[in-house]
Image (cartoon, rainbow, N blue to C red):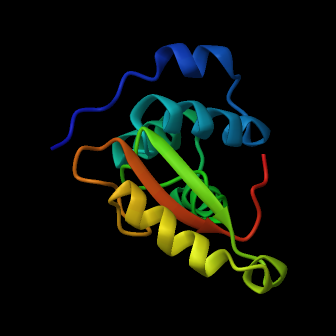
Amino acid sequence: MTPSPDLSDILATWPASPQNLLQVLRAIQARYGHVPAAAIDTLVQRWGLSYAAVRSVISFYHFLSLTPRGRYTVYLSDSVTDRMLGNEALLTRLCQRLGVTEGLTRGDGLVSVHRTSCTGL
């Protein structure tokens, strides 16, 4: 069983409320490079949220992930306009130069490259 991450400082900063969930998840992502399953368990237990509610926020926002991302995560916009302007070639070249496969974290954990429909926050 994976030990629960210590989220006490994060949870002390943000009162238990669904409207604070995104900020808490961003803080967890920044600390661990992803949102560990044990962190979701903690939020469900302490805040009384459902797993579906927490996981739906994580799956909606491209900058949140259930699996580890690189220390440096590059997001490349993937709208229709971006494709017309050559983002496919840029993505290919970027991944080659960084030695990483799109959507995966490089073996040393330093970098990952991902598509996003919107860079959002």
Q: From the viewer's perspective, is 55 left or right of 80?
A: left
Q: Residue at 73% across / 71% down in the picture?
A: 117
Q: How many marks?
A: 0
Residue 92, given in percent of the width and then of the height, sits at 49, 74
Q: Residue at 20% across / 41% down in the picture?
A: 2
Q: Residue at 61% across / 63% down in the picture?
A: 56
Q: Quadrant of the C terminus?
A: top right
User: Residue 86 versus residue 41: which sits nearer the camera?
Assistant: 86
Residue 46, given in percent of the width and then of the height, sits at 52, 32
Residue 39, given in percent of the width and then of the height, sits at 42, 39
Q: Residue furthest left?
A: 1
Residue 119, given in percent of the width and then of the height, sits at 75, 56
Residue 6 vs 97, above or below: the answer is above
Q: From the viewer's perspective, is 98 left or right of 54?
A: left
User: Residue 44 versus residue 33: which sits nearer the camera?
Assistant: 33
The image quadrant that residue 42 belongs to is top left
Residue 105 vs 2, above or below: the answer is below
